[in-house]
Amino acid sequence: MNVTPGLFDIQVNGFAGIDFNDENIDAGKLDIALEAMLNTGVTRCLPTLITASAPVLMRRFQALDRAVAESPLAALMVPGYHLEGPFLNPAEGYAGCHPAEAMTPPDIRLIDEIEKGLSRPILLVTCAPEFDEGMAFINALADKGKCVAVGHSNVGYAQLEWAARAGVRLSTHLGNGIPQVLPKLDNTLQAQLSCDTLYASFIADGLHIPPFALKNLLRAKTFARSILVTDAISAAACAHSGMYNFAGEQVERTDDGSVRLPGASNLAGSSLTLDRAVRNLVTWNIASFAQAIEMATTHPQQLMQQALAVHKRFLPQSEVVWDDDNTVVECHIAHEIIRRYR
């Protein structure tokens, strides 16, 4: 048996049949997702909303925030939100499953408008820094105490150095959100790997990144700067393949666990759970259990600590009990939530 801190997923779009991007989400639906996340050892998370037009984003955030404000589980598990888009690169290969037509140049006013009246702040923003407004936007986010990430971006080395000095601290799902074919060495993946001040998050499902490639990426970034995320959608923790909702679209989960828009080749989020990501790294002989746990607990907490402190979002202590097969058997948050699964 092992006892660890609770896992912290900083990129999760939905879970257990519930889409966090659904304008009809309510506290009951949210609690279904959060309860299922507890079963996988996740005790804190940043529900993630993706690219949409400004009016749609406003409605989605308002609906999600109402659900969070009314949920007893969210009071303990959800300190704030992750906005991935719409300030991304719309070029083919970089946009991924995000609607390119809804992408827009960076504009801090949209962040201000979205946050009006919310009970929780946007703590993490993923953007593409390469646009003219990018550096001013990053500076403004950092001044507001946000954690800033680069993702779905073609930012080069020189621009990234500037962006890091301006406030970028994370590469979102590094190795993904980029085209299948890039210049051999002078490319954004190499630039982000070489930037020692950045953390990087990785989707360790064996589909987004082949295990042998993930091993190389983790070596380059180092374990100390690496974070495990799921990028899960509503298909995660569901027993069956089939069609699931994701941000106004129907996506298909196939038997291998991959999720795509019907007929598309690129992935649309994942069906990964964070405990599975931990086990995968151990099974693939990439990391020890202790190293994998740090990537899902200590490292995301370190990344988000400044934003949490600025916004006065304090998380209760939590712990997870694992059996000898690295399966979650108990989950505790403070003295208020105790779950025993086996």
Image (cartoon, rainbow, N blue to C red):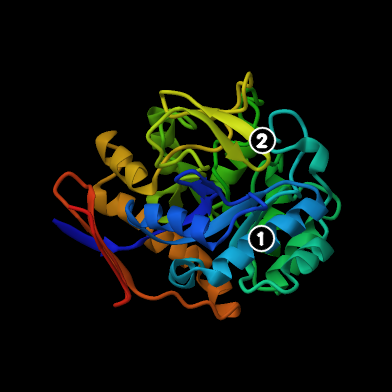
Which of 7 and 281 lies nearest the eye of the viewer?
A: 7
Do the numbered discs 2 and 1 sit on residues whose CB atoms are within 8 Å?
Answer: no
To which residue does mark 1 refer?
63
Task: Report whether 251 appears left or right of 44.
Answer: right
Please tell me which residue is depicted at 63% across the width and 50% down the height of the picture. 21
Which of 79 and 35 lies nearest the eye of the viewer?
A: 35
Q: Quadrant of residue 180?
A: top right
To which residue does mark 2 refer?
249
- Secondary structure of the residue carrying tag 2 is strand
Q: Quadrant of residue 157?
A: top right
Please tell me which residue is depicted at 54% across the width and 43% down the height of the picture. 173
Task: Report whether 299 appears left or right of 63.
Answer: left
Q: Quadrant of residue 156?
A: top right
Indicate the amino acid at tag 2. Answer: Glu
Which of 65 and 107 lies nearest the eye of the viewer?
A: 65
Indicate whether 327 appears above or below 284: below
**Residue 269 screen position, x and y as percent:** 55, 38
Q: Residue furthest right?
A: 132
